Amino acid sequence: MQTKIKGLSLWCAVFSSTTALTLAALPGTVAAEDTRINGFYENATYARDGVGLSKFRNTIQLEGEKRIGNVGIFSNVSVNGTLRGTYDGVYDLNDDEYGSEAGGPIQLQDIAQGSVPHGGGIAPTPLFGFDINENPNDGMVVLGEHLHDQDNGVAFGVPVRPCDVDSRGCIDDYLDKDEDELRFQEFNDRLDFIRELYVDFDLNFDSGNVLSTRLGKQQVIWGRTDLFRVLDVINPVDYSRNNIYDELEDIRIPMWILKTDYRMGPTEVFEGFAFDDLNFQVVWNFDEFRPHDIGQCGQPNVILDAGCFFRGMNNLWENGSTVANFAGATPDGGLATDFGPGQIGIRRANMPSWKLSNTQLGLKLEGVYGDLGFSLNALTYRSQLPSLRGGIPAQNPFDGTTDVYPSLIAFDIHFPRVNLVGGSLDYYSQGIDTVFRFETAYTSGEEFANTLRERLYSESDVARYVIGADKNVFIPFLNENQSFLFSGQIFGQHILDHEREQRTYGEAGIPDWEHNWIGTLLIQGFYMNNRLIPKLITAHDFRAQATTLAPSVDWIVTDRFRVTAGANVKVGDGARKFDDCRSCNPWDPFTQTPGVVNHQPGESAGLGGYEPLGRFKSGPIGMAQEEDEVQLTVRYSF
């Protein structure tokens, strides 16, 4: 046990020392009226169907506030901090699924032999093939095997052990966590155990207006939605914690930000028309760029299974690997092929370095007019989702030349600049006792996989919106004394420069749906003087035909002790297929696809499978189809 959690004592010492220093810096005693310190310990234990233990996360969180008051020209000065440390024991207690013993040898589909082991594919020339000692058939899974069969499509091995145990496929500075960084997720180079640390202060003007500033590590919340985000995109999100299902407050990744609000209060715009409140906000995220944590292959939660695709593709580039059903492929399958290093795959992640042009700037005007609240928003930022850009130099294994080949499945990861404009409305209707919410965003600069383009991606403007309503409804036969909360939302996404067309064997282009909608519904009841709270959360992806059902019951045993029991169950179509670019013919004439007339270099014939692009049609709900869980969480607050 000592070996497996060798970093625990070090990080506990760091965490304890930071806590002590933070509290020591606050003058006065904990009981003082201007000082607040509280926290909690929480254990979250989840079990997944077919896997066993999928989470044994132990969390300690401390929150503190010191109200200082007036300092020179500033008023309402306060210092706030939140420290969080976790240890997830799943990497020790279920290490053959998620830890140092995960994975094993794999078999890959081959039309001639049925299946071959990793390293057992064909090598048409001496430049094909790889060193099986550098890339052994161990510690691996087949990409997507938990969700679908290979079914005549692309498949390859993905290493799944922590990066200090097995470095294959670990992308420098992006998806390269060692075992301790998986166990103790907040204790890393970015000091994530300091969850928030900021100072608030106000500057009062003679006019009565106030300039309120918050400077430090923080979350900035622009959105009015749950589960999915439209405007709330300033902070990246840690999806490795629990996919999309944890509260955003718990999975946003705080950043070092300057947020300033010019509060004008009631403001007359012109005679006879005045806002009840008006506020102008400037947000400058000056922290070093941080993408979403999408989950590293080998973790229990890898949204869209994208981290596994990236790791397998980087292993292909660095070490070479076997790809199922590749050579001479038709809808009936193909020959498993051993590629060499530097021929196909993901070369590297180009992480934006810190410089002024890579910081992010947002503006928001918000106000209240009667029962109507509104905001107008603008933001320029780096996409927190990765984009794969082809067009990198790679080796042609038929003749040995290194060049840029059209539609070759060889990529670098980029995080493009995105510009967003949008707004929100919320309105309380007294007549029907309902709150209505609306949020919309229009972005330019987002990038999507596109097998019709030579670099296998294209840029598109995107329109998103959400319409929601919250209402309390009495259901007497269920509860005569208290109402139930019903909260529904419809999210829409429209890719405005969408491209897709029919080819010989299927559709090619952008795999994401041109138009898609996701609906969510929350039903929550209250019993035993609000100490027993049953809840049902549902989400349905209309185009993917995938649904999640998440029932739970909160029992507030005392003011300090809470128990939550729940489940997360998915139903629907699961995996979907799309063009995989096996038929993109980069090395003409060697890679022409059988049955395709006049096949041009770099042109897809639409031959597809589940991997890799079907995940964008399945969405995050469909790609988690086989991740049903029962969940138990206990929390003690102090």
Image: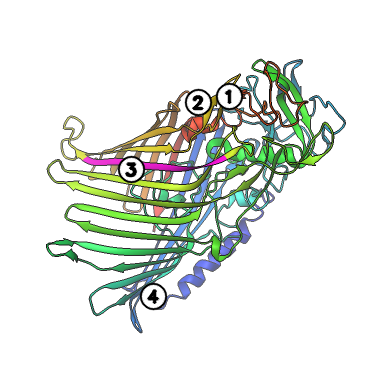
Q: Position of residue 128 (x, y in %)?
A: 82, 32
Q: Position of residue 194 (x, y in %)?
A: 51, 62
Which amino acid, mark 2?
Gly
Q: Position of residue 365 (x, y in %)?
A: 31, 60
Outermost residue to the right: 126
Q: Position of residue 175 (x, y in %)?
A: 63, 47
Quarter-of-image position of residue 99: top right
The residue where tag 3 is placed is 555
| Magenta stretch in the rendered image | 458-471
Among numbered discs 2 and 3, the one appearing first in the sequence: 3
Which amino acid, mark 3?
Trp
The residue where tag 1 is placed is 148
Image disc number at residue 549: none
- What separation in Å lies between label 1 and label 3 (alpha carbons)? 38 Å
The residue where tag 4 is placed is 29
In the image, residue 290 sits, relative to residue 97, either above or below, namely: below
Disc 4 packing (10 Å; few <14; some 14–19; many ≥20)? few
- What separation in Å lies between label 4 and label 3 (alpha carbons)? 33 Å
Image disc number at residue 574: 2
Label 2 residue SS: loop
Considering depth in this image, is 331 or 255 the residue closer to the camera? Answer: 331
**In the drawing, does residue 482 fall left or right of residue 609?**
left
Quarter-of-image position of residue 397: top right
